[in-house]
Each structure stands twice: as C-alpha cells, then as structure tokens.
Image: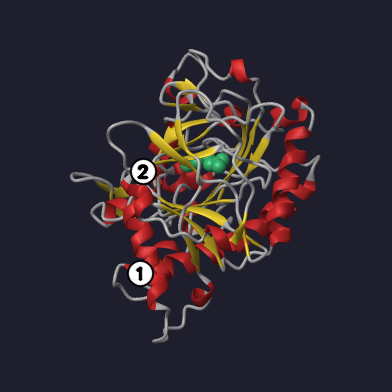
Amino acid sequence: MHSSSLLKHLVPFITRTSQRRLAAYAQSDLVLHNDPVLPIIDFSSFASKNETNDYPRDMIEKLANACEHVGFFYAIGHGIPNELLLRTLSVTRQLFDLDSKIKNQYAARLSANSSKLNQQFRGGLARGYQSVGENVTNAKRDRHEGFDLYRDLEDNHPLRLQFNDKNLSNKKLPDYPELAQGRNPWPKEFPIFKETLTEYTAAMLRTGERVMRAIALSLNLPLNHFESTFNESFWVIRCIKYPAVHQNESKSPEYGHGCGEHSDYGWLTFVNQDPDSHNCLHVRTTDTTKATYVAADPIIVNEQIALTCNIGDILAFITNHKYRSTRHCVISPVKPARSRISTPFFFEPNLDVKLRINETTECYYGEYLTNKVRNNFNYYNDETK
Ligand SMILES: O=C(O)CCC(=O)C(=O)O
Ligand SMILES: [Fe+2]
C-alpha cells in the first residue's frame, strides 16, 4: 500500500491498461513510487458543445476527484488518432536532428532583444529554437532542446492590429505586444514540421474544448461556462528533446533536470510523450514531509494513446485552489535509453481575457503570460546578454 494521500485517491485501472514496467531505479535524489498510477478519464461524451442531460455522472465525479486531489490525469476519448500523435513526435525528433546551423537560424534568442513595438517581430518572445540549457527553471539550466510555438494571430486580428503604429501613442494599450505580434519562425528547410504541427494544433484545440466542458460540469457550472475564455485560445506548444545522460552526468551545479520542478501557467496542459519514455515525467505527491513523486509514464488504454493532462495555475486560482495545479518535473533519460521527445500542448485562455491571478492583481492573460515567459530565459533578465 502507498502511504501518500495522493495515491489514496487513485483508481486501480491499471489492469485494464497495457503498459510497460518502470525502469528499475529512481535517478538522483528523487523518491519515486513505482506504480505510475494516475486516474484515467474518458472524455468521449464531451465532443459536442450541445447541452444534453445525460452526461456520465460517475465520470464527472471521477474528474472532480482527480482535479481536487491529484491535479493530473490520463485523458482518453480525447479524439486524436494515435497516428497523428506519433507522427507529431516523429517529425519533432527529425527537427531536432537537423544541423544546428539550420536550427540556430530560428533561434528564440534572436528575437529576444527586439523589444520595441515598432520593430518587426520575427519570432517574438521565445518563439523558436532553444539549445540545451537556454531554458532556466529554479535558477538551473534545463537539460533540453526546445522549439516553442505560440498562436499566430491572423494579419487582421484586432489584438494584433491594436499595436499598429498609429495606435502606439495610445497609453491604454495592454502590455503584451510581443505575444500579439510575434510570428512562429517555421524552418523553411523542413516544411513538414509546420504542416504536422498545424494539424496537431487543430486537433488539440478540439481536445482542450472537450476537457474544459467536462471541467465546467465537474465544478457544477454550465457545460459552456468557459467557452468565451478560450474561443480564441492563445495556445502554446513546446516541442522538446531531452537528451539521454550518463548516470554520473545527472547532477551538476549549473544544470538541473531535463526540466526543473514547476507548475504550468494557464488552463490545461496535454502532454503527448514518447511511448518509449519511462520514469521521466515525475508528478509531485501531496506528501508535505518530503519531495515524493509518481512517474506519469505514457500509457495505452484500449489501443488508444492516453494524453497526460494537468491543471494549470489559473484554473487552480479561479477555483480557490479547490483544483490543484500540481508541480512536476522531467528527469533526463539515462543511457542506454534514447533521448525523449515530448510535445506538450498548453490549452490557454484568450490573450485579452481579464483574470485575477492572485489575491491582489487583475490583468490580461497576455500580460500574465509575458511575465512568465520572460522568467524562463536568462537573456530577458540580464541586459548584458
Ligand atoms: O516533457 C514533458 O513531459 C512535460 C514538460 C513540462 O512539464 C512543461 O513543458 O511544462
Ligand atoms: Fe509542465
């Protein structure tokens, strides 16, 4: 039996799932429970936004329970074919296999200094390629390569147009110009990346809507309660490669884990992770006496790849922390395992949704996100770089 209170709430569905055993040991100083059990929730009843009266009560209760006590769950019935999930991972792996000269042409840091409104934002605040160690979490460099994509607002989108030159003297403009004006720097040498990620985005947006409907019901709110907050979702995708490390390489004063411990920012995160990846994504339990984790390994349920889903800080905040935004981290794969690819999709509010982000502050989601993103990179915080 597990003693942590998180695990008491987990449902023993594991016998219905096909999954591989965990790698035998826990890396570094983390204490790891060896049963990667998170609740498994089926969202197939929420594909439509038409209200009906016969939503499965047991599923909604299970979802409420998962959001309150765990903050993580496996989503099935999400509507995305396995083939698209796997193709996205495979194309992302190929992207990172490109020559670094090509990848660096699309580097996020190239646009980091273009902070003036009237400049052409080629990338615009962290869009594009990041080499290993550029991302910083808890003051340590993360051991991953990334390629970040954000919603690209259309040319004539009012949230983009508001920053046009003729409006620049308008003192009341919101403070998220880079996000609204940025463009994803799609590598022209590898057009399949744009094609695939665009298809993935469309599918993930439908999934996000599905899950947010179920979340609304789980909070005793109307099915479409959150619709107006995400109908122009300013989604984010992080394409990530975690290189495999040697066992003795895994600790260093400068470098932390594959991705240091954090919680996510907004509504919901859906992690599409490498099916080969084991013992990497670690979810913190509610044990306050010491840092303990469960591994959220990839699972397949009834031949369907489950998405690993977690609650973001804003959803936690607007529910008065009834729903948990659970901290998690990614431990680098250890050789001889191969590098790990994941493509987390962050289903987020519209840029111009006004949010209360803590007890005293209300701001636009775009402003909140701008602050969060700047803190992830040293070059935004250190003018000399
Ligand atoms: O790669 C993963 O599995 C998760 C990454 C993550 O937690 C994040 O990007 O916020
Ligand atoms: Fe995360």
Q: Residue at x 70, y 43 (%)?
A: 186
Q: Is residue 178 visible?
A: no
Is residue 266 found left or right of 305 in the rendered image?
left
Amino acid marked by disc 2 = Tyr
The disc placed on residue 356 is none
Could you say whether the residue bearing mark 1 is in a helix, strand or loop? helix
Give the mark, 1 or 2, whose residue is nearer the N terminus: 1
Place residue 335 in its image quadrant.
top right
Circles 1 and 2, Cβ within 8 Å, touching? The answer is: no
Label 1 – label 2 distance at C-alpha: 31 Å
The x and y percentages for residue 346 are 50, 51
Q: Front-most of 5 and 223?
A: 5
Q: Position of residue 375 (x, y in %)?
A: 42, 30
User: Looking at the rendered structure, which numbered label has been put on residue 61?
Assistant: 1
Residue type, label 1: Glu
Residue at 50%, 52% (x, y): give it. 160
- The residue that mark 2 highlights is 368
Instruction: Please report the residue visible at 56 percent of the width from the left and 47 percent of the height from the top.
Output: 344
Q: Judge the density around disc 1: few (<14), some (14-19), many (≥20) Cα neighbours within 10 Å.
A: some
Q: Nearer the viewer, mark 1 or mark 2?
A: 1
From the viewer's perspective, is 21 left or right of 378? right
Give the image location of residue 206, x and y in percent. Answer: 55, 66
Q: Give x and y (percent) for residue 280.
A: 56, 37
Q: Is residue 16 left or right of residue 95?
A: left
